[in-house]
Image (tube, rainbow, N blue to C red):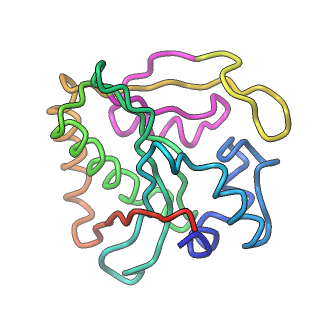
Amino acid sequence: MLPALFAAIGHPIVFVGGYGGGPAGFRDTESAFVDWARRYYDWADGNVFAVVIAAGPLEGTIVGTTTMSDFELPHEAAHIGWTAYDPRVWGTAVNAEAKRMLLGSAFDHGFGRIKIQADAINDRSRAAISRLGASFEGIARRHRPRADGTWRDTAVFAVTVDDWPHIRALLDERLDAHAGHPVAFRPMPSH
C-alpha cells in the first residue's frame, strides 16, 4: 500500500504546507518515500489508515492517509493526524467524509475529545479543519521540529463529544451534497 500512497501524496505541493516535516520531508522516489513512511507514521501505537475511494470513477484508488493515535484512555482523548490527500481530491468531500467516519467511531467508542492539528503555516489545512467545525484552541509554539531543522508552531483544534451532535449534522449536510462518492478506510501495513 505504501507505493500506492506515494502515487497519491508523493508530490511537493502536499509537503509545502508542513506535512511530513515540510518541504525537506518530501521524498521524490517511491523507495525513498516508503523508507520515510516506515519511520514517519505511528505504526506501533496508532491506527494508520489508507483513505480509499469506495465508489465512482476513482473506485479502489488510495487517495490519502490518516491516523488515529496519541490515545489517552483515562482522559478519553485521542488525536486524528498524519493526514494528507492526493491534490486531485482537495476541495472535495473526501476529508469531510474521512473525518466524519473517524470522529463518529471515536465518539461511539467512548472518547470525549479528539485533537486535530496542523503546522501553523499551513493555511489550507487549517481552513479544512475549521470547515469541519473543530474549535481552534490556539498555537503550540515551537512544538515539533521540521525536517529542515526549523521548529514548527502547531495550530491546535479539537472536537468534543459535546460538540459532536452539531458537527455531525454539519458534516452529514455537506456529505449529502456529494452522495455517491464515499470513502473507505483500509488499515495500512508498514511493509
Q: Residue at x 27, y 24 (%)?
A: 76
Return the residue nearer the eye: 25 or 15: 25
Residue 90's spot in the image, x, y percent? 50, 58
Residue 46's spot in the image, x, y percent? 44, 45
Image quarter hosting the C terminus? bottom right
Q: Residue at x 38, y 32 (%)?
A: 71
Q: Residue at x 34, y 54 (%)?
A: 98
Residue 126's spot in the image, x, y percent? 52, 35
Residue 98 is inside the magenta segment: no
Q: Residue at x 51, y 15 (%)?
A: 138
**Is 32 positioned to the left or the right of 86 in the image?**
right
Residue 124's spot in the image, x, y percent? 57, 43
Return the residue nearer the eye: 79 or 100: 79
Residue 121 is inside the magenta segment: yes
Q: Is residue 21 above or below residue 138?
A: below
* Displayed quadrant of residue 106: top left
* Displayed quadrant of residue 185: bottom left
* Displayed quadrant of residue 109: top left
Q: Which residues are magenta?
A: 114-139
- Identity of the residue furthest to the front in this view: 44
Q: How many marks?
A: 0
**Is 50 positioned to the left or the right of 147 in the image?**
left
**Is 139 positioned to the left or the right of 162 in the image?**
right
